[in-house]
Amino acid sequence: MSSLARVCAGVLALLAPLGLPFTAFALPLSSGDRVKVTIPEGEEFSGIFEVNLSGELELPYVRGLQVTGLEPHQVEQRIHQALVGQGYFQPSFLKVSVNVVQWAPVEVFVSGSTFQPGRVLINEWSDAEQTQTPVQQSGQAPFNRLLSSAIRQAGGVTPTADVTEIALIRAGRRQTVDLSGILTGQPFKDIPLIAGDQVVVPDSGSINPLLVRPSQITPVGVKIFISNLTVPAAGNAVAGIGRDATSFPYGSRFSQAVVSGNCAGGALWTNARRKAVLVRTNAETGETKVLERPVEDLLRRSTDNDNNPYLMANDAVACYDSGVTNFRDVLGVIRDFVVPGALLYDVISP
């Protein structure tokens, strides 16, 4: 271990209890990570080992070494101390190399302005990866254990999230990360995560249009519910409302659901005054809000997000007939009752 590395490790140790920002020199180990230990003239201690659930590395003839939260060079030092301390090697003759050959799935905690906050699992292995022996090469990059992966697993950020001030908390230390480059194409730092990391996405209080479109940290699409039991369509089937009509790219608006549900168009005098209703339930509070808009105004005179909001998952959209159509239906009901009654009266009257 170089003198510079020792100084850096010492600085990190001083920062940890103060809760100051951290900067990792290498990704610390988590339970399940697999490492290759190489010791010249010590083949019985060499091989590929997996960090167990207790966070220990179990080498032959050596009691479990606690390694979670340590970087590979720190694990090398701990193994060196253990082997020398137990009398297996002389300090001057022992060399230890530790390299990560497979990063494990890890559980992290995401809170704040995401659609599905909570505990998420990232970098999940396939069935083949769980059983096969990892390739003995070092330097594997944990592309599926990044901060953006955790946010995506938590359902993606909401339209009001502040992606410039995302907090990453590790072992009591906090770091602020700006992920806005993921939306604009500018360079940004996507930090690899370890088990137990906490991610907090703050809320800005206002809708950011950049966050209402498919991206690496937003949903790809939304599924909503549409009902169009209006004239001339007597049901959803004949109105052409199938799976394609209820699945929308993320960033679609209320007006697009109205058109997709065949609630717009047709005879101008009878259909132009139709109304559409958007029903949305807050997943956290259970509060339901209803927005009613005339279809023609929604299509022609929508000016902002309040008049024509973005669609969110599980929104419900219903269409209602115009006053002209309703009046015609009332006349039809009267006709259905009055005309047969008059005919019956003519038959039974003297």
Image (spheres, rainbow, N blue to C red):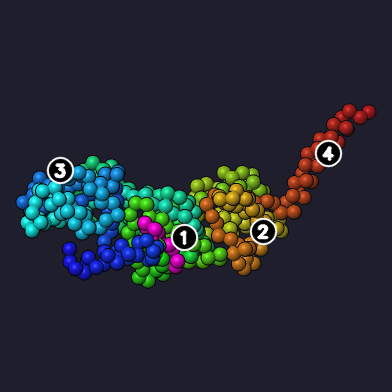
Q: Amino acid at mark 4?
A: Val
Range drawn in magenta: 164-173
Percent position of residue 193, x then y: 34, 57
Residue ID for mark 1? 201
Is mark 1 in CB contact (under 8 Å) with mark 2?
A: no
3D distance between C-alphas at marks 4 and 3: 96 Å
Q: Amino acid at mark 1?
A: Val
- The answer to whether residue 149 is visible is no
Give the residue at x 62% y 56%: 264
Q: Mark 1 or 4 closer to N-term?
A: 1
3D distance between C-alphas at marks 1 and 2: 33 Å
Q: Is residue 158 left or right of residue 143?
A: right
Q: Amino acid at mark 2?
A: Arg
Q: Mark 1 or 2 closer to N-term?
A: 1
* Quadrant where the image shows the N terminus: bottom left
Q: Nearer the viewer, residue 252 or 60?
A: 60
Give the residue at x 25% y 51%: 67
Q: Magenta-highlighted stretch: main secondary structure?
A: strand
Residue at the outermost bottom position: 186
Q: Is residue 87 left or right of residue 6?
A: left
Percent position of residue 216, x then y: 40, 60
3D distance between C-alphas at marks 2 and 4: 35 Å
Q: Mark 4 or 3 closer to N-term?
A: 3
Residue ID for mark 2? 293
Percent position of residue 94, x then y: 9, 55
Give the residue at x 44% y 63%: 166
Q: Nearer the viewer, mark 2 or mark 3?
A: 3
**In the drawing, what numbered circle is on residue 60?**
3
Percent position of residue 329, x then y: 75, 46
